[in-house]
Amino acid sequence: MSTRRDDEQWNAPQWRTVSRDAVLHNYKQISDYGLIGDQMTCALVGIDGSIDWLCYPRFDSASVFAAVLDINKGGNFRITPTAESFDSYQHYDGYTNILITEFRTNSAHVSITDFMPCFKVERSMVTSAEIHRRIKNISGSMELEVSLAPRFNYGMLVPKVKSVKDLGYTFYSGDNSSRQEMALLTDLEFDADGEKGILNRRIAGQDVDLVIRYGGAREHTIRATFTDIKLRETREYWANWISKCNYNGLWRDQVLRSALTLKLLIYSPTGAIIAAPTTSLPESIHGVRNWDYRYSWIRDSSFVLWAFHALGYTEEALDYLDWILSMFYLCGGNLQVMIGILGERDLSEIILDHLEGYMQSAPVRTGNAAWRQFQLDVYGILLDAMYFGQKHGDKEYTKVYNHLVRQIMSGVERDWKKPDCGIWEVRGEMKHFVYSKVWCWVAADRARRIAKSLGIDEDVLRWKKLADEIRSEILKKGWSDSLNSFVRSYDSSDLDSANLLMPQVKFLNASDPKMVGTLDATMKRLMMGEGYLYRYLSEDGLPGREGTFLICSFWLVSCLAGAGQVDDAKKMMDLLCSRANHLGLFSEELDPENNAQLGNFPQAFTHMGFITAAVSLDSVLSEKSGHHERPAKKELIGKVS
């Protein structure tokens, strides 16, 4: 079963012709991938049946498959027809994260079901660090080539491979103290090149289960992989989770797919939410704007909470908040914009110059130097999330207030008049970004609300005075009469799509004349085509260009809807939805010239923006039409009365 909509407002799955020569020698489009995962790590599976990206055993571990970053050195696990050309059709198994890739020739039809076991027993999450690949012969007899060539440590280590009697094969490198292993569990015999670390075999007309697992085959006493049971349990887990979504609007199918994607980007042991499961997929082909997104940004993660709560998933929001509070409790003066999925602080950036990069778009990076940046919005974003937790959780917040809220607000009082690096993490000159100042206002406003609920009257007055002071400065220094718009930074004439967030955080209503002016100016100066927005067009300290930023366009949809320009909002929403890939997945950016997806994939920021835009626009459309049968929209984080 695919996730196809009857009205086809997005690129629903369809058969596509694939050349074997392209499979062997060319990079796929970023949009040619599907995602599977187990809330510990994720893998990208191409429409040609090749797993081209996998980091084991965690999102931020070194890769074992990285052909998406170097088609020759990265390694992959390929199951592909040997025919010179064939048709491919890729879809999910209903509303789950189980991916099905089908191949068809004139005489035969096969399918590959790819999944990572992920389910609960009682309250405990069960994962097995496995990828199951079930090959099913549907009709005829199609010859498939199975090629398994892992390359450890981002392609720097070519493992050796050996057969393990009655179990399968083990790939290994290093000695006992630094040994790395991965197993293929199978009863098939492969042609093994032990020194080059490659397994090959051709099969035809067979139903076969192939399982790769972190760790060697010697760790197993029997070959049984229990694929049937794990597939059933995994299917039930995802189906049960998505059944709790309360969204029933116009974009339901794609909203559910986005929710399932965001759930895959949660590291279940801690609740950390990663920005994307990949590194260094470029923002422009042959450009240098290639970053590692396999970490937890406070901003991105908190924005994801807006989406989860809007769909009725308060538990995920509170789990993340519990984790982030534990990371910063008693150290509110030492906040950092991003941390590792286990709370790591040092995320120093390293260039892997042995990899050529996606379509020769070097450099390939691990780590992200933004962890050291000064970004003012982290104060407001964290306090906004804490305000949400206080409203919707069941915990006593007095200690949190004393040990964290007050410390954060001390930082706001100390820092809010300083320049910073902003939401877009510029690597050039720090400036007084208007977006950043707005989040300082949010910090003071949410602290005031928390203090009021706790009856701390002196702080209510203190934070209100600060909020009013910040607001007054923004309206004076961040507004341009000549442009009739908020600007990117004080004393500039540049614009910034991030200012479209003002209504969502309740700084101004979307129908306020200043927001309407900002909306019009943003579309006039930053829009490419009918609905694609650049983040900004001013210099940022880096060479080259980037694509249009998808979340900015979804912010625009929300603003248009709030300003009463509903028809324009819906038209833009439908256009953006059509730019998702065949599975409903979005990357970070789009190339405005050819609509190709760019940047890390799939991107949590984009899917969050889509969900919040869908919920907001649906609510306005429902009110406009006079239909109120849909469930009332839940209050989003950042949306306060």
Image: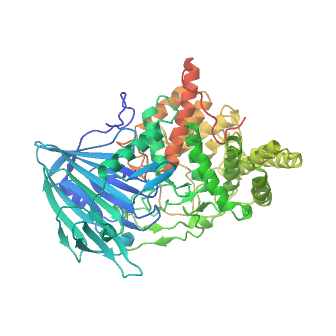
Relative to 250, say whether 435 is above or below.
Answer: below
The quadrant in which residue 197 appears is bottom left
Q: Position of residue 194 (x, y in %)?
A: 22, 75
Residue at horizontal 29 percent and vertical 62 percent from the top: 76
The quadrant in which residue 158 appears is bottom left
Single out the residue that lies furthest toward the right. 458
Answer left or right for 557 relative to 507: left
Q: Position of residue 382 (x, y in %)?
A: 67, 52
Q: Report the colour scheme.
A: rainbow
Answer left or right for 478 relative to 5: right
Q: Is residue 437 visible?
A: yes
Relative to 74, say whether 629 is above or below.
Answer: above
Q: Is residue 574 visible?
A: no
Answer left or right for 82 relative to 523: left
Q: Position of residue 188 (x, y in %)?
A: 18, 61
Single out the residue that lies furthest toward the top. 626
